[in-house]
């Protein structure tokens, strides 16, 4: 809730097709520094594809992505630096199973950011502390609960000093009793001023945390607005229908 007026990321008329299947038809959005943006919408609507295009796990078919005003899709643009600045937390945690918690949070720092081992270790420890996982540094992912693994995944992501952190349904794979601990870590992160784009089905959380909400359905942003507007005064009947599933 500390959004400034500086737009750091823009999507303009983004389209993405897989073969004949046009998944994103026209996605345009602006994200300001410090903003918490949430993407909601029905399954298959293109939420994950939008995030995956933002961090270039998928190549958009057409349209523009600009980061600090620079064209990310230009052939001259340094994608490695960009990818390090745009972090992602996945539904399935995606930790390295053969590494312990501490190593999971160090490896990217050493390989991508070229940090020395000791510096990487200190940063990893600080971030594991922030997510309440400092006492588990020697554990393997398989020894942890889903909520604990996701908190480690968040510590790993923030150890890369991202400017934007993307979350793709970070609590959807968790048992219900573990959802709260992960949402609470995300709320703490939001309070630090980190820019976040979150795909979630946790509507109460989205309402509380978001500066801006995008409702994506059939590959377009069918509606967008502040939480009060979108949840209490939806303008599009698709939004109303979607939200009625959560009442
Ligand atoms: P959401 O996250 O909103 O549930 P997705 O972005 O995952 O939706 O998917 C939107 C549509 O794109 C779905 O129909 C899905 O099957 C299709 N899709 C996603 N990724 C691929 C892919 N790599 N190849 C082919 N189709 C895909
Ligand atoms: Mg998805």
Image (cartoon, helix red, strand yellow):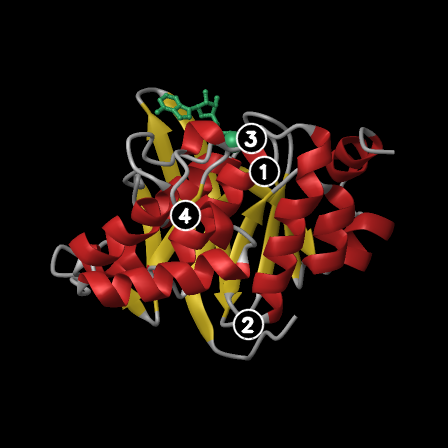
Marks 2 and 3 in Cβ contact (< 8 Å): no
Closer-to-camera residue (37/74): 37
Residue 170 location, quadrant: top right
Rounded to the nearest angstrom, the CA distance separating label 1 from label 2 is 23 Å
Q: Residue at x 42, y 69 (%)?
A: 8
Q: State the image coordinates of residue 237 (x, y, percent, origin top left).
A: 79, 36
Q: Residue at x 86, y 51 (%)?
A: 232
Is disc 1 surrounded by few (<14), some (14 to 19) or many (20+) residues within 10 Å? many
Q: Which residue is mark 2?
A: 193
Q: Earlier in the sequence, mark 4 or mark 2?
A: 4
Residue 94 visible: yes
Neighbour tally class for label 4: few under 14, some 14-19, many 20 plus, Cα within 10 Å = some
Residue shown at 54%/55% (left/top)? 131
Residue beneath label 4, please?
Answer: 137
Label 1 SS: helix
**Residue pointed to by mark 1:** 147
Residue 167: x %, y % from top left: 51, 46
* Residue at the extreme top of the image, as rendered: 20
Going from the N terminus, do you reach mark 2 or mark 3 first?
3
Assess whether mark 2 and mark 1 are in contact (beta carbons under 8 angstroms).
no
Q: Nearer the viewer, mark 4 or mark 1?
A: 4
Query: Which mark is drawn over residue 45?
Result: 3
Instruction: Tell me where residue 78 appears, x and y as whole percent.
Output: 16, 60
Label 3 C-beta lies within 8 Å of the nearest ligand 1 atom: yes
- Residue 149 lies, with reference to residue 166, above or below; the image says above
Q: Find the distance from the CA under tag 2 to the CA under tag 3.
A: 29 Å
Of labels 2 and 3, the one closer to you:
2
């Amino acid at each position: 809730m500390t959004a400034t007026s500086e737009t750091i990321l823009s999507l303009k008329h983004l389209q993405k097709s897989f073969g004949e299947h046009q998944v994103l038809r026209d996605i345009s959005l602006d994200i300001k520094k410090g903003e918490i943006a949430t993407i909601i919408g029905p399954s298959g609507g293109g939420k994950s594809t939008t995030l995956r295009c933002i961090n270039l796990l998928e190549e958009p078919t057409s349209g523009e992505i600009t980061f600090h005003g620079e064209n990310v899709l230009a052939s001259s643009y340094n994608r490695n630096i960009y990818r390090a600045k745009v972090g992602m937390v996945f539904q399935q945690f995606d930790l390295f199973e053969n590494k312990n918690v501490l190593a999971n949070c160090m490896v990217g720092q050493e390989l991508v950011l070229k940090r020395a081992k000791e510096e990487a270790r200190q940063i990893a420890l600080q971030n594991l502390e922030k997510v309440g996982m400092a006492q588990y540094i020697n554990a393997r992912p398989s020894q942890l609960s889903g909520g604990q693994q996701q908190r480690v995944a968040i510590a790993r992501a923030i150890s890369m000093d991202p400017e934007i952190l993307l979350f793709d349904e970070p609590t959807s794979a968790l048992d219900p009793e573990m959802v709260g601990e992960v949402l609470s870590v995300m709320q703490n992160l939001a309070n630090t001023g980190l820019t976040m784009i979150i795909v979630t089905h946790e509507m109460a959380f989205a309402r509380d945390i978001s500066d801006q909400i995008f409702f994506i359905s059939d590959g377009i942003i069918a509606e967008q607005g502040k939480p009060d507007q979108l949840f209490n005064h939806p303008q599009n009947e698709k939004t109303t229908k979607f939200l009625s599933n959560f009442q």
